Image (cartoon, rainbow, N blue to C red):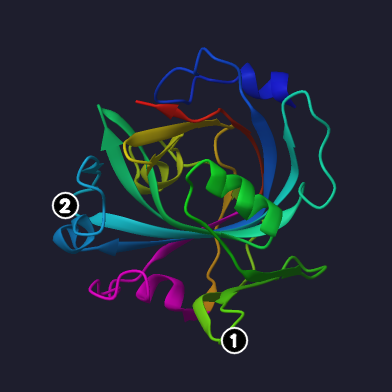
Amino acid sequence: MVQRLLHKVDHRPFALPERKWGMKQTWNDLLFVHWPVDIKQLQAIVPEQLELDVWEGAAWISAASFRVSNLRLRYIPRLPFLHTFRELNIRTYVRYKGIAGVYFFSLDASSIAAVQGARLAGLPYMHANIILNKTLQSECYFKSERIDRQSQSHSAIFEAAYLPDNQIFYAKAGTLTYWLTERYRMYYMKNQVMAIDLHHLPWPLQQVQPSIQQNSALTQLAPQIAFTDPPIHTYTQKLDVLVWPMITI
């Protein structure tokens, strides 16, 4: 799998890192939901060191719900209780020193061990109860919610049901879907700008119309932002990913 990924790079907007990759994993049954939002409202919650990336005058916030599998570090076999878990990411689109990437507002995971490991690197991971079920007919049900163990209160809930169609397509360069999905760098703040590089093949996408039943994961994050315009959605059944160690840039 690794060599196949490393030999396919012509779709990337910038070159692979020269240093060695540090982790590989697979993303499964991934639902992307993308909302256009007001630039000024979004800029207020993005670190000032990062330039907000926009598409035709609109900024975007996205939610990604999926299951991680086959996670392992380089040279180390996959670890029990850590190689698979469910995850929910809330992100937006930014640039730093001319390189486009994503900035994560929150990353929720069902594995306490994965959350603790990510926090050591300064990533804003939170532990959440997350369900991802899939029927034989490929219909998925996803629900993520953080639970305060003392008060038993629930927060940051995202709940959706989705059934993709059977036709796979690849976003064309210059389209909005390509702009939203083909991103290969993750930025975050740890006293300064940090970056994590990613690599994978072009996204194999399928059309989907999810039923989103709860979405306080977004409204709680950014109560000043109005999510009034209709979102766009895609589904990906499986994507193998390489991850490089974080760097200061």
Q: Judge left or right: residue 74 versus residue 122.
A: right
- Determine crowd level at label 1: few under 14, some 14-19, many 20+ residues with C-alpha closer than 10 A: few
Q: Is residue 167 among the parts visible in the rendering?
A: no
Q: Position of residue 239 (x, y in %)?
A: 65, 42
- In the image, 210 versus 1, the foreground residue is 1
State the residue position of label 1.
152
Asked whether 229 falls inside the magenta stretch, the response is yes
Query: Residue placed at 60% from the left, 17% from the top?
Result: 20
| Amino acid residing under circle 2 | Gly
- In the image, 59 versus 122, the foreground residue is 122
Q: Which contiguous range is marked in magenta?
A: 213-236
Q: Secondary structure at mark 1?
A: loop
Q: Judge left or right: residue 64 versus residue 229.
A: right
Query: Residue placed at 78% from the left, 69% from the top?
Result: 137
* Relative vertical location of residue 165 with respect to residue 196 in this rendering, above or below: below
Query: Residue placed at 42% from the left, 33% from the top?
Result: 195
Quarter of the N terminus within the rendering: top right
Nearest-to-viewer mark from 2 and 1: 1
Quarter of the C terminus within the rendering: top left
* Relative vertical location of residue 224 with respect to residue 247 in this rendering, above or below: below
Asked whether 102 falls inside the magenta stretch, the response is no
State the residue position of label 2.
57
Q: Position of residue 236 (x, y in %)?
A: 61, 51
Q: Judge left or right: residue 92 versus residue 207.
A: left
| Labels in figure, total | 2
Counting residues from the start of the chain, the first of labels 2 and 1 encountered is 2
| Amino acid residing under circle 1 | Gln
